[in-house]
Each structure stands twice: as structure tokens, then as C-alpha cells.
Image (spheres, rainbow, N blue to C red):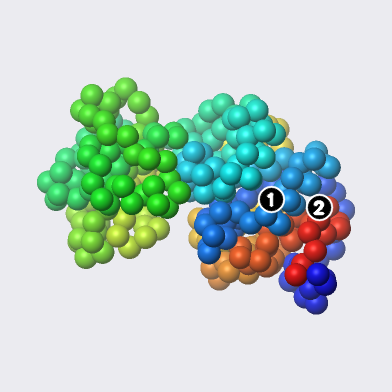
Amino acid sequence: ATASATPPVARNPPILPYLPKLVACDVDGTIINSTTHHTDAPTTAVVRALLESTSTRFYPATGRNRAGALLAMGPELSGLLREKYNGNVPGVFLQGLVVYGEDGNLVYERSLADDMARLIFRKARQRGVSFVAYSEDRILCEKLCPRVARMATLNEPEAEVVDFAELVGKIALHKIIFMDSVETIREIREEVRALVQGRANLTQALPDMLEILPPGASKGDGLRRLLKNIDIHPKEVMAIGDAENDIEMLKMVGTSVAMENAMDSAKAAASFLTDSNNNNGVGKAIERFILGTPVVEAS
């Protein structure tokens, strides 16, 4: 193999004069290859070198729950992180709704109010749309229909069939997702907006899914709470991301890196640009900024 003619990080920044204490890394579109749907071996090798040869921590910061993030990363990287952190991986999950601290235990969560959850479930039943609820690492449903079952193909944990009437008020429900045709979801979005009256936020990652979340949560807020828990200043953090929900996180840290495949808004928020998620972009950024020498030769 020969070294690539292009620099691993565009704009060719110098190696950092200090060692970041944490790398906060997005999952989808960042550390996951969009073809294999897992983390590539070269990227895993670089993360391994980071954890074994430096004191820098590596934590996910993602819209997935922790179980889904580890599934999506694939067995090699998830196994490495589980081994490093004694089975309980710290990080920011569910867009900052759930934060696990240094020992992997829950340090912060924000959930939907019980009455709001009941209203949302009632609306889903009235309209006949499929729906699931997230509770930490669990995905819950009333019935396992094809739309719900499809989530397992997206590297999400298998949904559990439960009785929501029994569970509401007993466990935290962090977000609810409606699933139907693109047209139905477009119609129901305005109905749900009127229903929640500002007491929940609506967002869409896919056109046939509508997510309903508690107001005020974000990856940036979750990372801020995590850093307070582990006593690390934002300037001592390197964040890597690709999407709109990464912007607040990218703006708050000392070293911010956007993927080559990132949205323009995420690139504008970052100080530096690395290669794409399909070409070891995360690994190249860590090599360039922290390790100083390539762990894996470019092909």
C-alpha cells in the first residue's frame, strides 16, 4: 500500500499542542460506513491505538440509544469499548436525553411527561399508525407489526411488546416514534404539533417516521452535562460529527471536526474537515490530531 497523496484532514492543521481528554464521536454518518453499516476495521484499529496508547477517552454522542449505537458500530468496535469501560459504555445517547457517566451509569435523563405520553399514544391509536417508545436501552411497542420489525434491520434493538397502560408512570419514556407512509406522517405531524402545544419537540430523521421528544434536549446539552460529571472542560474535547444535530456539540468544544460527507451546516460549524465515513474519516482525524502517525496505511 502507498500513502494517500491527499492530507488526512483537509485544511491540513497541525497536530494539537495538547492532548484532548475526550473524543466525542457521532455514530451514523460519522463512524459507521454507509455501505457495510458498521465501523470499518481501519477506524477500529485507530480507536484501539487511541485507547491503548493515550489517556484520551472515546465516547459516543448519538441519537441512538446505547444498545442501538453499539449494535450499529459492529462487534469489533463495540467489543473494544465494552472491554475498555467494563461493559458499561459512557456517552451521550438519544440526542442528549440519556447520559451515562464515567462508570457507565446513568447521570442524566429527560423523559416525556406521563400525561403527554398518554396523549401521544391515544393519537397514534386514533390514526392507526404504528409506534414505538424508547426507554433507555429498550424499544417498546404494543404490537410487532412489519414497520416496527423493520427497525431491527436498522441496527436497533428488537422491540418488546408491552402494555403501555401498565407502564406509563412506572418507567421513563424518553421519546416516541410514529411510523407510516410519508403522506400520512406529513399529515399527522401538524396534528401532533397542535396536540403537544410546545410541551414536546417534533423531528424527523426519515420521511416515514415522526419523533416526539421532550423539549430542550440536544446532544450539546447532553455533552455539557457529561463533561460536568467527569470534570472535563469543553476546550479539552475533540468532537466529530456530520449532521445538524451535531452543530451545538461542534461549536462548544476545543477541536471540532466535520466529515467530508457532512451537511454544509455541520461543516460550517466545525474548525476542521476530515475524510468521509466510508474512507476512515474518524480514524484519519484521530491520527492527525492526536496520535501524530498513521496506524493504518492508506490504500
Q: Residue furthest bottom?
A: 5
Lateral position of residue 242 relative to residue 166, left or right = right
Please state the horizontal and vertical placement of residue 228, each as a whole percent of the image: 64, 34
Q: Which residue is mark 1?
A: 44
Q: Tell me the CA gap for discs 2 and 1.
A: 15 Å
Q: Residues within 10 Å of mark 2 (few under 14, many from 20)?
A: many
Q: Which residue is mark 2?
A: 290
Q: Residue furthest front?
A: 1
Would residue 190 be seen by someone viewing this image from the given angle? Answer: no
What residue sits 76% from the left and 41% below the top? 51
Q: Residue 116, located in which quarter of the rendered image? A: top left
The quadrant of the picture occupied by the C terminus is bottom right
- Dot 2 or dot 1, earlier in sequence: 1
Q: Residue 277, located in which quarter of the rendered image? A: bottom right
Q: Residue 203, located in which quarter of the rendered image? A: bottom left
Q: Which amino acid type corresponds to the residue marked 1 in the rendered image?
A: Thr
Q: Secondary structure at mark 2?
A: helix
